[in-house]
Amino acid sequence: MPSNPTVWIVLIIAAAIIVGLMVWKGIGGTFARGKLKVTLHDAPKAAPEVRVAEGLRTEGGKVGNITGVKAAGTDTPAASKVDVANEASFSKTNVGDITGVDQTGGGGLLPRARKREK
């Protein structure tokens, strides 16, 4: 470890410049202390908006399930906004389920209750 304060000042300024550039360019990073591990990666992309059956008009007949996002297990894709059947109109129509997010199987969204042992 250097004992000269000038070296520490230069190192701190260099680290501040690097972190500032990473934030400005949208680059993520992982820094570890043990054996100096540095990893850079792209910033996460914005989650897409999901729009399904917007403005749908039906008269008579039968419509099956209308689903915005369907996933199995815990692999639910991220979406910033799920809009299903916005401004849709159904007249004399047999409609199935209208679902924003359908997650089946796996862990689910809520933890399962545990049984207490006596």
Image: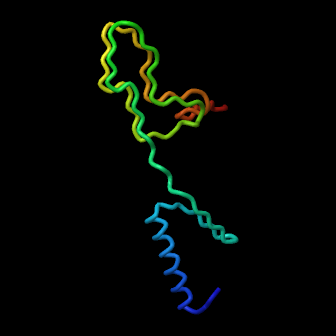
Between 106 and 71, the residue placed more toward the observer is 71
Task: Specify the color scheme.
Answer: rainbow
Q: Residue at coordinates 56% horizontally, 63% vertically from top-left? A: 29
Q: Residue at coordinates 56% horizontally, 35% vertically from top-left? A: 111
Quarter holding the N terminus is bottom right
| Left or right of residue 33, residue 82 in this image | left
Between 111 and 30, the residue placed more toward the observer is 30
Q: Quadrant of residue 52?
A: top left
Horizontal and vertical percent position of residue 112: 58, 32
| Left or right of residue 12, residue 57 in this image | left
Horizontal and vertical percent position of residue 8: 55, 86
Decide: is 74 above or below 12. Answer: above
Residue at far right of view: 35
Number of disc labels: 0
Quarter holding the C terminus is top right
Decide: is 44 above or below 80. Answer: below
Q: Residue at coordinates 52% horizontally, 34% vertically from top-left? A: 109
Q: Quadrant of residue 88?
A: top left
Decide: is 56 above or below 73. Answer: above
Between 11 and 27, the residue placed more toward the observer is 27
Horizontal and vertical percent position of residue 51: 39, 32
Horizontal and vertical percent position of residue 93: 36, 9
Q: Residue at coordinates 63% horizontally, 32% vertically from top-left? A: 116
